[in-house]
Every structure is written in structure tokens, then in C-alpha cells.
Amino acid sequence: MRDSFNEINITPLTDIFLVLLIIMMVIAPMLDQQGLNLAVPEVVNQEDIAKDTKIMNFAVSGDNKYYFDGEEVAPETLEDFITEKAKDFPDGLLIQVDDDAEHGAVVKLMDSARNVGMTSISLAH
């Protein structure tokens, strides 16, 4: 009579799991994701902001046009314009965004400011 097989050998399964675990532990540090570092803004009243701060104020309108102090800035000249004005505004950039403005227009302005070297960028609604 033939002996029945009553046990399951889990050794090969355990070996596979250990190998996969080691592979994941080696690969995980290499998966350094690039991204935008965002800091959560704190709520500050307008009166609390000192008057002597020098912040560059840009506005993005609903039709995706850029305005600085009421004058329109062409999208092609954003980086040159920000480079020229950055010396007078060392405290950063404040972008006031209209409700109908497209996300891409705001990101283009933020990228232009980052390319010029501005590190302090804030958004206002």
C-alpha cells in the first residue's frame, strides 16, 4: 500500500519570500523620487505682515495672462523679467491666482521663478 502524503514542505516558499525581501531592501533606497518640496503655510493676518518686506507680487488672470504691478508680462519673457526684478525683491514671490486660471499657467510662473533662483514662492487665492 502506498503511503499518503500528509505534509506540505514550505521551505521553497520561504526561500522565495526571503529573496524577494532582500531584493526590495536593496532597491528601495535607490527609488529616490524627485518632487517639489512643499511647506504647509501658516495662517497669518495681513496686518501682521511687516510693511518693510519686499515681495514680488505677480497675478495670474482668468485668461492665463501674467501681471506685475498692473502691467502685463509676456509668457516668453517671464524668466528675464523675474531675473531683472529679483534684485529689488529679495524676500520672494507671491502669486495671486484667479479662480479661472489654468494650473499650467501657474506652474509655468513657478518654474520660471525657480529657474531664476527664487526659493520662497507663495500662492494666494
Image (cartoon, rainbow, N blue to C red):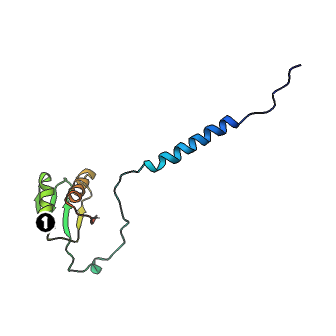
Quarter holding the C terminus? bottom left
Q: Position of residue 60 (x, y in %)?
A: 20, 58
Q: In which quarter of the image is residue 47?
A: bottom left
Image point (35%, 59%), residue name:
37
Quarter holding the N terminus? top right
Please identify the residue farthest to the right as the structure is shown.
1
Label 1 Cα crowd, 10 Å radius (few <14 / some 14-19 / many 20+): few
- What secondary structure is marked by label 1? helix
Q: Position of residue 20 (x, y in %)?
A: 57, 41
Q: In which quarter of the image is residue 10?
A: top right
- Residue nearer the viewer, 118 or 67: 118
- Residue nearer the viewer, 45 or 79: 79
Give the side of residue 88 with respect to residue 111, left or right: left
Image point (85%, 24%), residue name:
3
In this rendering, the answer to whether 91 lies above or below 114 is below
Give the side of residue 85 with respect to residue 47, left or right: left
Q: Name the residue under label 1.
A: 85
Give the side of residue 2 with respect to residue 61, left or right: right
- Residue nearer the viewer, 98 or 115: 115
Q: Which amino acid lies under the numbered mark 1 shown in the image of this protein?
A: Lys
The image shows a total of numbered marks equal to: 1
In this rendering, the answer to whether 67 lies above or below 7 is below
Image point (61%, 42%), residue name:
18
Image point (48%, 45%), residue name:
27
In this rendering, the answer to whether 58 lies above or below 7 is below
Q: Position of residue 112 (x, y in %)?
A: 20, 56
Q: Position of residue 68 (x, y in %)?
A: 14, 64
- Residue nearer the viewer, 34 or 58: 34
Q: Quadrant of residue 48?
A: bottom left
Please identify the residue farthest to the top as the structure is shown.
1
